[in-house]
Image: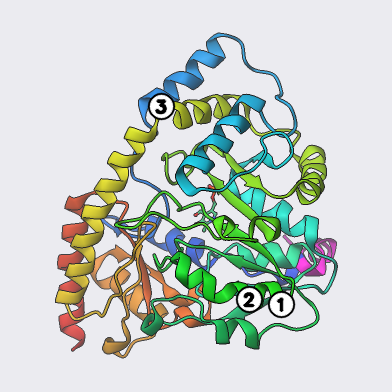
């Protein structure tokens, strides 16, 4: 392309899109993909194939000719199952006809939640380190992200002091993601309780991304929406990608009080029409009969979590115990390298791909994210290679 046509093409993009940085994860993994023999602890998705019962339900729905649109909000049967599931598992109660919307992954739910509530210049608090999509999606919705810090010393949990010190007259909402990507941290009901008076005092909306809600080890996930008075101010987002190993199906959901949900439905009906019908059929089966499959996968993640956390500690990398999701977030501060240098050298010298922690925000610096959703055999090899690498540095 000539310089002139590049300039013309650039001017066609909006200033907001032009200013977005490409995902730090992608850039790094394109490099890893071009090399042979790399063990990747980078991808944020289950290593399991979707259990057969869900695939079969979808195939059978196709055979029976279920190929048309569903209602905009998703099949009512599915919304009823979501309502029952959320009530039984997380003690949160949303009305299937007025308060639940089936979306194209949790990703769409995050996008329409932000677009439905933000006016230009509204501030959204984001707890760092955080999932890489929040900042760009807030900006695309006209909002301004304001980052709150957490540290390994407090297990990456948000403190009331940090929350209160960033609230201004423009603050509209806060995004939480617990169990957390990238730290694996969780919040207990008591820890949530400490934040509630501040959320109430400043009348903040909560966007709670609970996509890893089923993946906890030890204690069940405490949804912030289940706490007294919180359902009204919480937009709860979840989906099937992680718990049911259904990333490629693109199916999630969002729950909120009727007025907010109607706002999101407006955007969804004009931009998506509905979530894929065959994926909704698979999701119905997941909620009706897929609990056993899910629990087997969670148990397998638990074993692998124990193995990698021990492994990191043994090779001299301090690592807090992740209570959920499938990521460990060890500190590499003892090596003296920045997260980006550590990740790049590790990839080049030992062919292990991890994600530098600063990709998830400034407070991730000094850490690397390692997904343990990969086979035990690969994890063992990766830890051996990392041990060699770290001992060379010291
Ligand atoms: N939220 C978080 C915290 C994630 O880590 C991811 C995927 O990695 C998503 C949302 C996207 O989920 P989905 O596949 O349902 O769009």
In this view, the residue in front, 327 or 188, is: 188
Q: Is residue 106 above or below residue 14?
A: above
Q: Which type of secondary structure does the marked residue at label 3 adopt? A: helix
Q: Is residue 96 left or right of residue 280?
A: right
Q: Which residues are magenta?
A: 1-16
How many angstroms separate mark 3 from mark 2 (CA)? Answer: 39 Å
* Inter-mark Cα distance, 1 to 2: 6 Å
| Circle 1/circle 3 CB separation < 8 Å | no
Residue of label 3: 289
* Vertical arrangement, residue 313 with respect to residue 34, above or below: below
Mark 3 surroundings within 10 Å by alpha-carbon count, few (fewer than 14), some (14 through 19), many (20 or more): few
Q: Nearer the viewer, mark 1 or mark 3?
A: 1
Of the numbered discs 1 and 3, the one sitting upstream in the chain is 1
Q: Is residue 356 magenta?
A: no
Which mark is drawn over residue 201? Answer: 1
Q: Position of residue 373 (x, y in %)?
A: 32, 52
**The N terminus: image quadrant:** bottom right
Q: Is residue 157 above or below residue 233?
A: below
- Give residue 124's position: percent from left, percent from top: 70, 72
SS at badge 2? helix
| Residue at 84 percent of width and 64 percent of height | 8
User: Label 2: few (<14), some or many (≥20) within 10 Å?
Assistant: few
Q: Which mark is residue 197?
A: 2
């Amino acid at each position: 392309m000539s310089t002139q046509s590049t300039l013309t093409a650039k001017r066609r993009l909006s200033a907001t899109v032009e200013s977005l940085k490409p995902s730090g994860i992608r850039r790094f993994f394109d490099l890893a993909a071009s090399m042979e023999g790399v063990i990747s602890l980078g991808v944020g998705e289950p290593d399991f194939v979707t259990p057969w019962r869900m695939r079969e339900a979808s195939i059978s729905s196709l055979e029976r000719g279920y190929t048309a649109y569903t209602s905009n909000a998703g099949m009512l049967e599915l919304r009823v199952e979501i309502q029952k599931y959320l009530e039984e598992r997380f003690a949160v109660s949303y009305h299937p006809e007025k308060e639940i919307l089936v979306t194209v992954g949790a990703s769409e739910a995050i996008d329409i939640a932000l677009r439905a509530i933000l006016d230009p210049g509204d501030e959204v608090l984001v707890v760092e380190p955080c999932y890489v999509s929040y900042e760009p999606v807030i900006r695309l919705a006209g909002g301004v992200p304001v980052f709150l810090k957490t540290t390994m010393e407090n297990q990456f949990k948000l403190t009331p002091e940090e929350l209160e010190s960033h609230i201004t007259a423009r603050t509209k909402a806060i995004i939480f993601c617990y169990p957390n990507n990238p730290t694996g941290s969780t919040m207990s009901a008591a820890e949530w309780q400490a934040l509630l008076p501040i959320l109430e005092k400043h009348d903040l909306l909560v966007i709670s991304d609970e996509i890893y809600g089923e993946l906890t080890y030890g204690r069940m996930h405490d949804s912030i929406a289940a706490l007294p008075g919180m359902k009204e101010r919480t937009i709860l987002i979840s989906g099937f990608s992680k718990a049911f190993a259904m990333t490629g199906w693109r199916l999630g959901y969002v729950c909120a009080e009727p007025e907010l949900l109607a706002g999101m439905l407006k955007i969804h009906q004009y931009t998506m029409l509905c979530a894929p019908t065959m994926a909704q059929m698979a999701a119905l089966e997941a909620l009706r009969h897929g609990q056993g499959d899910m629990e087997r996968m969670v148990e397998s993640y638990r074993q692998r979590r124990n193995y990698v956390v021990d492994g990191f500690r043994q090779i001299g990398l301090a690592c807090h115990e992740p209570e959920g999701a499938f990521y460990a977030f060890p500190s590499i501060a003892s090596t003296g390298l920045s997260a980006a240098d550590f990740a790049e050298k590790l990839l080049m010298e030992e062919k292990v791909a991890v994600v530098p922690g600063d990709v998830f925000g400034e407070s991730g610096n000094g850490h690397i994210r390692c997904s343990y959703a990969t086979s035990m055999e690969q994890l063992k090899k990766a830890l051996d290679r990392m041990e060699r690498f770290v001992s060379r540095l010291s």
